[in-house]
Amino acid sequence: MSTKPLGAQLSHMLKNRGVEVIFGIPGVHNQEMYRGIEEAGITHVLARNEQGAGFMADGYARATGKPGVAYVITGPGLCNIMNPIGQAYSDSVPMLVIASCLDESVATRGQLHQMLDQEGAGATVAQWSQTARTADAAYHLVDRAMLEFQTSRPRPKVMNVPIALLEGNAEDAPDHKVQIAFDAPEASQIERFARMLQDARHPVVILGGGAVRSGDLGAQIADAAGAVVFTTYAGRGLCAEDAPLNFGGTLGRGGSADIMAQADVVLVLGSELSECDLWRDGLGHTCPLIRVDLDPEVLIDRHRATDPVLADCSVFSEALLAAMSPSDSDWKPATVASLRAQWRRETDMDRPGILPLVDALRAVLPPETMVFSDMTQFAYVANETFPMDRGGHWHHPSGFGTLGYALPAAIGGKVGVGDQPVVSINGDSGFQYNVQELATAVELGLSLPIIVWDNGKLKEIEDSMTAAQIAPNAVIARNPEFLRLAEAYGAHAVAPRSIAAFQQAVTAALSADGPTLIHITPETAQA
């Protein structure tokens, strides 16, 4: 055993638990956490705002499947990262935020970075926020977080550590290895589900983000049952795009409710079927609903599964597939193809002029590309129409719906996957929420295409106001000269004014010696 300041010990402990990268910003209050980073052999990525650090940790976690870790300071540091914590909570992202905090805040006022209740503030957006009062408690909280990331629905945690405790000496963290094994449901239950699917004439399988670790097992179950497949946005790519009964990421289309109404059994793997998945109150089914999830809250929600199963999707899917025999259904591939074509036209009509650019982008991106998108109309169109051939490769801020996500998340993702292609898709307004993180991308020399869709306004809000018969107000703001802004940070910048030029710009940016801002407008698709 050795003795070091606790701040240094935490970095060594995280390295021992498999953490390779930490995102953050050092300050006087959390500098002790930086004492051990280099010694432990951890890479630190300097963000320009704690919000950027949080989204980087989120992007890293989504891209790699490993927990994203961030170091922040007392008070404003924690407040700045709360938005990313909220996003990570709604999208089930494993993120551990370690924040310094004041030693005493009851009898003393006016201290630097003081807030009324830092632990309570973190608890409003994280799965839990706890304050470690001893070194053993800090070690316990780290291991608790890491174990929960692996064994339950992965959601962000906040650990607050008093400054004096970080500065004080502590012995090494104990070794802690837990053997994790998930049990499959009873064989009789699995056999009953297999019969339900095989006997159904109109079976439906829905694949969510919680099924990503299961690979194509969900698609294999659907194929064996002759089921049609829908995916949530987070589940896109879990079924081959050219599968004849795959509806893709169109679950939010109103017409999907008509398909659900025809179903005689629905199997949902790893989705909370939230408002942002359906954009309606319910699925539209009247048949038995088999629901598989790690989150017990999901299993008793408004959808009221007739067969709720608390289980890991991978373990459940392996057992179910082994119990199934191939069977036919009454679904027709021609029906699926016709409806997909119809819904694609509807998407184009809802937000005109974007689909040609989405198609053009898909044509030039390597299939292994990791995409991070912001809350922008470009992404809304792509979520339904951009074909994916593998799961866990398009990341969108669903649920919490934070603007400013795509750029820093793509930076974190690129740090995590290295040479694998990564693309950031932004709207003109959302890009400016975290534009300062361009400096981090330049500093790291990341080959990162940063697409900025600039329609000169908050078009989605303008459309919504118009539909509600509200005179559009405050939806137009003066934008900067994006190319000069990017160049000021040291990034490459280009403004293609045709679809062909756009494709050339993306291809070049994937291998450039730094990030490239690619500025496109509605006119780009018309040239």
Image: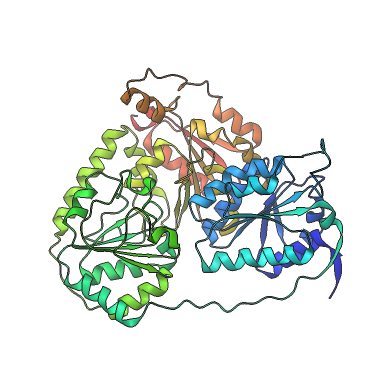
Q: How is the image coloured?
A: rainbow
| Residue at horizontal 36 percent and vertical 58 percent from the top | 237
Q: Position of residue 490 (x, y in %)?
A: 65, 37
Quarter of the rendering occupied by the C terminus: top left
User: Would residue 511 be seen by someone viewing this image from the given angle?
Assistant: no
| Residue at horizontal 82 percent and vertical 51 percent from the top | 163
In the image, residue 417 above or below residue 408: below
Horizontal arrangement in the rendering, residue 74 relative to residue 455 (left or right): right
Residue 327 in which image quadrant: bottom left
| Residue at horizontal 45 percent and vertical 62 percent from the top | 295
- Residue reaching furthest to the bottom: 187
Horizontal arrangement in the rendering, residue 34 relative to residue 293 (left or right): right
User: Would residue 16 be seen by someone viewing this image from the given angle?
Assistant: yes
Quarter of the rendering occupied by the N terminus: bottom right
- Residue reaching furthest to the front: 107
Residue 195 in which image quadrant: bottom left
Q: Position of residue 225 (x, y in %)?
A: 22, 70
In the image, residue 146 above or below residue 61: below
User: Residue 384 versus residue 114: which sits nearer the camera?
Assistant: 114
Label count reads: 0
Q: Position of residue 323 (x, y in %)?
A: 28, 80
User: Residue 308 versus residue 403: which sits nearer the camera?
Assistant: 308
